[in-house]
Amino acid sequence: MFRKIWVNNKHRDFQRIVWRERPSDPIKHYQLCTVTYGTSCAPFLAVRVLQQLATDHHQEFPNAVKILKEDFYVDDVLTGSNTEEELIQNRKELIQLMSCANLELGKWVSNTPRIPTEGTDSTQSSPVKVLGLYWQPGLDTLSYNVGLKGNCTKRQVLSDVSRIFDPLGLFQQLWLLDLGLNDKLPKQLADTWLKWRADLDILQHIQIPQLVVNDTDNIELHGLSDASMKAYAAVVYSRVINKDGSISTSIMAAKSRVAPLKQQSLPRLELCAALLLSQLIRSIKAALRHQKVTVFA
């Protein structure tokens, strides 16, 4: 995607490259004319181009523009519809909209056979990686695939933790111990880490339904938060009463935070958890399209 976005002429000199094959050769000057992957401004420029594309063509492709504004994450789009016909129409509009900027959506994976898998090795029977999670199209479920191996050195632990999240404030403990990158962890900390790493295998057996039942105009959000001296967290579930009287519940989102290095009281950390929950509920409400959202927290 980045290589499809041109950089303004007056800014291309910031992407100048000087090069020569041998010390005796004259220096050659090159300029990169498109957005360069790896630069700090690249994600912003990509998102800004998509926003401008939506502004310029909102009357021609209203449905695709809504998806572009709400369901894109830089160059990935994750969206869905209530019917296959609506999904196929949205896909068609989205392709047309992106082609206005000479951008091509090259990979497609869907849980309906009416939209064939394109540009990827995945199939409906195999999982596809989606923003750090694995989506099983045939089952329409989300799962984790975490396999951590290696020695208990500071370097290895930091590498493993960066792939997931900071368990038990491990980052804080490692830096407070002032260990070298290749130093072994103290036995107590190493035992804690090995036990936690072994428990990660259980995650691969958890399947989270991707679909959140939302056909009704009314939806309930139930939020829970809690804290300990090491961390605090919040989670939000949805509860929907279907037309036949049955009840459907789904997990909407969850967040966790490690407690600050400066020791806080447990009541204060519980207030931090409550604040985290309120922020989470607010962001979820903003994303929902229901006419009535009832919150229980």
Image (cartoon, rainbow, N blue to C red):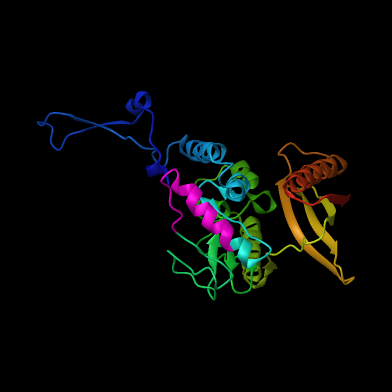
**Is 53 positioned to the left or the right of 262 in the image?**
left
Q: Is residue 97 magenta?
A: yes
Q: Position of residue 93 (x, y in %)?
A: 54, 53
Horizontal and vertical percent position of residue 160? 54, 56
Relative to 103, residue 211 above or below: below
Q: Is residue 130 above or below residue 56?
A: below
Residue 78 in view (yes/no) = yes
Please state the horizontal and vertical placement of residue 87, each as a whole percent of the image.
Answer: 60, 62
Q: Which residues are magenta?
A: 88-106
Residue at point 43%, 47% (across, down): 103
Camera-side residue of 182 and 290: 290
Q: Give the quadrant of residue 57.
A: top right
Q: Is residue 184 visible?
A: no
Report the front residue among 149 and 179: 149
Query: In the image, is residue 129 part of the stretch drawn in magenta?
Result: no
Kindly identify the residue that appears in the image at 81 percent across and 65 percent down.
249
Residue located 56% across and 66% down the image = 110
